[in-house]
Image: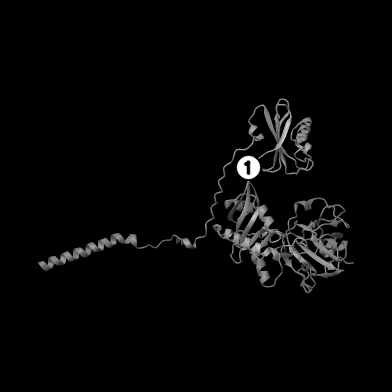
Amino acid sequence: MIALFGTLIGLATVASIIALVMRIGPASVPLASSAPAVTALADAPAAAPAATTKKQRTKLPGPWRIADARAEAATRVLEGKVGTSSFLKAIEEAGIDKKEAYRVFNALKELKNLDKCDKTDTFLALVDRASSRVKAFEYVVTKEEVYQSKEGPNGELATLRLDFKIERARVSGSFVVDGDIDGSAEKGGLERGMSAVLAKALDGHMGLDQLDRGDVVRVVAQEVTVLGEFSRYAGLEALEIRKGDGKEKPFRLYFHRGQSERGYYDDKGRSPYEGGWRKPVKDAPITSHFNPKRMHPVLKKVMPHTGTDFGAPSGAPVGASSYGTVSFIGPAGPSGNLVKVEHPGGIETGYAHLSRFAEGLKVGDKVKRLQLVGYVGSTGRSTGPHLHFTAKKNGEFFDAETLNLDGMRVIGKDERDAFAKGRQQYDELLDAIALPQPLAETPKAAPSAESAKQDDDFATGGPEPTPAASPAPAADKAAPPKGGNPVYLTDKDLLKSQGASDDGEVAE
């Protein structure tokens, strides 16, 4: 009996354990499912960085302004911009009576030269509704420079330059490039207006169009505030650019103001030399060098490449590399629309494949360094928009790059110690700026059947795809420039109009 009873208890215990396991089993054992697996957090694409909050600012009380009187029933506010008109004409066009316009002119002329107005200057006038008499007038050059005329008890307009609390302060920050520079800077907590000072600092070193999506910019800047509110960036003291792919060393620039030299220098103490020969297209990359044994991309035979090609979109302005005299302008066979400039020392430069010429330009005109001579195009024997830039010495072609285009100068020995000290201080400031979050990766579109076919053609040595026609710039649709210069001509038309030699230059 005891043995039987013990056996029954053992069986009951085993049954209880089995029941307990069956109850908890479904919750702990994973079931097969058709749902996709959850991507691990470390493998998920980075989310778009949230916009950084801008610096909080408090507006300070200031002098009375015409804008404060907008709600007054007895007066009205007129406003406008000088534009291309004279001062008197501009304010009359805004609705001020001629007699009152002269009254305002006489009141302002003691403090402001109204014969030299900038087209961006603006103005406001407080005018009495019943008599059309000007009670107050403001001439605004910038947020910092405002002239105000206000009628006193004697009926005369008394004028003064408004006194604002203007402050300049050092600020720093960073942003990741995602579209336009000002918008990207704003997302990083900085103010709009960054693009202008950034372009000025980079001038001669690189162009803003060389910044790609995902590149990171860190800046030490000077800002100007008026009555506590942001007015403008006065300039950059230092900057760093990190390429988004991380394949290049970060690029840094520093502003140096020394006893004899000033400007933006890189970490090796180099700055663009602005006194010599310049690139005809600002910041344009070189896409093809001078090569006496070049295989011609169109004719598929060995032909000398007598110049330097600069890659640029159609319509980009082209300037004279240095001062000189225009010696030729017109169609030039395979060179398309061509301008030639003679320079001192027996040097002549050429600017080929232009879409059009600078309006009114003619042979014999004197041109200054970087003065506009035409616009990038693809006329003549060309595979796409670019500038073919040539140089001759006493009638013989030579490599234009030997002119040291946009050459760099090294900071003088007497300034190097001061520069090194300033660079060290700026490096510490740049290193202290937090880097922004990277952008989310943009999914790559699947290649189309046509592009895949073109890729196969290149891989197998097949035919080169026909380049898409570049849209003509708006100005190109205008009437031809003075003197009958063509805007666009085909190779056939150009060859008919003037013979050409095999090197692409006008046949003598």
Q: Quadrant of the C terminus?
A: bottom right
The image position of residue 288, as x and y in percent, is 74, 68
Q: Check disc 1 and report its element: helix, strand or loop.
A: loop
Q: Quadrant of the N terminus?
A: bottom left
Which quadrant of the figure has residue 118?
top right
Looking at the image, can residue 450 be seen?
Answer: no
The three-letter amino acid code for the residue at tag 1 is Lys
Q: How many marks?
A: 1
Q: 482 or 88, which is in the foreground?
A: 88
Q: Residue at x 61, y 51 (%)?
A: 183
Looking at the image, can residue 364 be seen?
Answer: yes
Q: Which residue is mark 1?
A: 165
The image position of residue 502, as x and y in percent, is 84, 70
Which quadrant of the figure has residue 324?
bottom right
Local crowd at mark 1 within 10 Å, few (<14), some, or many (≥20)? few
Which quadrant of the figure has residue 449?
bottom right
- Residue furthest to the left in view is 1
Q: 179 or 202, which is in the foreground?
A: 202
Q: Residue at x 62, y 58 (%)?
A: 239
83 relative to 284, above or below = above
The image position of residue 20, as x and y in percent, is 26, 61
Q: Is residue 363 left or right of residue 187?
A: right
The image position of residue 238, as x and y in percent, is 63, 58
Q: Is residue 507 left or right of residue 53?
A: right
